[in-house]
Image (tube, rainbow, N blue to C red):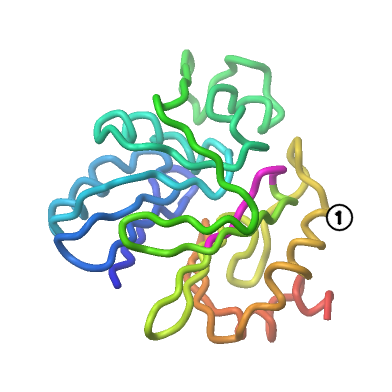
Amino acid sequence: MLIEGFPARVAGTNCFVVAQGDGQQCIVIDPGVGVAETLEEIIADHRLHPVAVVLTHGHLDHTFSVLPVCQARGVAAFIHPADRAALTDPWSGLGLPFGAPLFGIAGLRFAEPDDVRPLMDGVPLELAGLHFAVRHAPGHTPGSVVFTLATEAADVLFAGDVLFAGSIGRTDLPGGSGAAMTASLREVILPMDDAVMVCPGHGPRTTIGRERATNPFLRNLM
């Protein structure tokens, strides 16, 4: 199994490339700001063939490069319907006036890729020969999702901004909900096995067991 992750140039958002191995099809998870060069290097170095972009949620630091990545490769983008509007209007999810400068850049415009497909709770995602279990986990945004991939070593959770090493995603932005986040942590995250490796939307990788033992936001729910 090949899982390559690297931080975007803005906000340190983790972008992941996942494939069965070198020379295989792959998916790209959460292509943020300024990821194109590193992403192309990884694809070339491992001789990969992207077949889709999968988004954990609609915030701009996770979706900024979805249009160029999808259009350059002619592939679909997958996102939960509750966050789809953010692909064309990222300002509302950040509590900013439409058209306001983002990341200090004025005049930005956004559009959906030609092919946008829904991610639905409990509906498996079969891409690049990989089987992802999909769970809706709102709280950070209404359409936040997490994906679990079974591997020979241990399951891997792509957690977006639901769970970080030592913390969780913020709930104070438009569409966020502390109550929904608590429910997502209790019903989606806590039942997972301790051995599950967590690839979060920001920061280092961790495990469910480590977070269950040390993350105050999880410990307060047990």
Q: Is residue 68 left or right of residue 87?
A: left
The x and y percentages for residue 216 are 75, 75
Q: Is residue 153 left or right of residue 221?
A: left
Q: Tell me how many marks there are.
A: 1
**Quarter of the N terminus within the rendering:** bottom left
Residue 202 vs 113, above or below: the answer is: below
Q: Out of 34 and 147, give the one closest to the viewer.
A: 147
Residue farthest to the right, as pictured: 179
Q: Residue at x 55, y 40 (%)?
A: 118
Specify the amino acid type for callout 1.
Ala
- 143 in the magenta segment: yes
Q: Residues within 10 Å of mark 1 (few under 14, many from 20)?
A: few
Q: Residue at x 33, y 43 (%)?
A: 35
The x and y percentages for residue 6 are 35, 57
Q: Residue at x 45, y 75 (%)?
A: 150
Which residue is identified by label 1?
179
The x and y percentages for residue 213 are 69, 86
Residue 139 vs 81, above or below: the answer is: below
Q: Out of 167 and 222, give the one closest to the viewer.
A: 222
Q: Out of 190 and 81, give the one closest to the viewer.
A: 81
Magenta-drawn segment: 141-147
- 23 in the magenta segment: no
Q: Residue at x 76, y 49 (%)?
A: 171
**Quarter of the C terminus within the rendering:** bottom right
Residue 170 vs 147, above or below: the answer is: above
- Report helix, strand or loop for mark 1: helix
The x and y percentages for residue 163 are 63, 64
